[in-house]
Image (cartoon, rainbow, N blue to C red):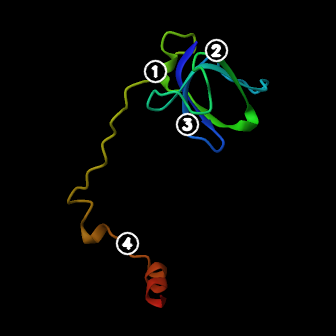
Amino acid sequence: MIQNAVLHLNGEQPVVVDLFELPEAVDLGVRCTNMRTLDGKRPVFIDDIKAVFFFPYEAVRFVEIPARSLIGTELEVQVEAPVAVAAPVATTESLDDDNLEIDEDFLRRIREV
């Protein structure tokens, strides 16, 4: 069971659901239960949030499955910590006028504008 997936339906606000399995391309739609709005309330178009729901793919824009929802399943995503990359530091040597080359063609195009 994949909990707290967000189902984005055509013409409706997103709802939070629990998926029985990951949707696959060969499926006809999405099967879920425990449907609630983003604030945890029962959507107005259903009677029982614990019922089993089936939405055909033509009614679904997309399914959002946060990585935290896959924790403890065989589909758990290994998220690595972001790597910081330092930008190159300009030195006074690289800023000398002798090292700069002026592209005359570029300057000509600027003057024409």
In the picture, the disc for residue 76 is none
Residues packed near mark 1 inside 10 Å, few (<14), some (14 to 19) or many (20 plus): few
Instruction: Residue 44 in the image: state x and y as whole percent.
Output: 57, 33
Amino acid beneath label 1:
Arg
Please state which of residues 48 and 104 is positioned toward the viewer in this rendering: 48
Residue 15 locus on image (x, y percent): 55, 31
Q: Secondary structure at mark 3?
A: loop
For the residue labelled by badge 1, is the local secondary structure a helix, a strand or a loop? helix
CB under 8 Å between callouts 1 and 3?
no
Q: Position of residue 6 (x, y in %)?
A: 55, 30
Q: Answer with the quarter of the image where residue 46 lies.
A: top right
Q: Which residue is mark 3?
A: 14
How much space separates mark 4 and mark 1, taking CA atoms? 52 Å
| Mark sitting earlier along the chain (4/2) | 2
Q: What residue appears at the point 50 percent right and 19 percent down from the top-left corner? A: 69
Q: Of label 4 and label 1, which has the lower sequence position?
A: 1
Q: What residue sits right under mark 1 in the picture? A: 68
Q: Is residue 46 left or right of residue 72?
A: right
Q: Position of residue 51 (x, y in %)?
A: 63, 16
Nearest the eye: 88 or 12: 12
Residue 101: image tag: 4
How far is disc 3 from disc 2 in space, using C-alphas? 18 Å
Mark 2 and mark 4 in contact (Cβ < 8 Å)?
A: no
Badge 3 or badge 2: first in the primary sequence: 3
Residue 20: assigned label: 2
Please report the residue visible at 22 percent of the width from the left and 56 percent of the height from the top: 91
What is the distance, in whole Å, between disc 4 and disc 3 at their CAs?
55 Å
User: Residue placed at 43% from the left, 31% from the top?
Assistant: 39
Ranked by sequence position, the earlier of labels 1 and 3 is 3
Mark 4, residues whose alpha carbon is within 10 Å: few (<14), some, or many (≥20)?
Answer: few
**What residue is shown at x 75% (from left), y 27% (from top)?**
25
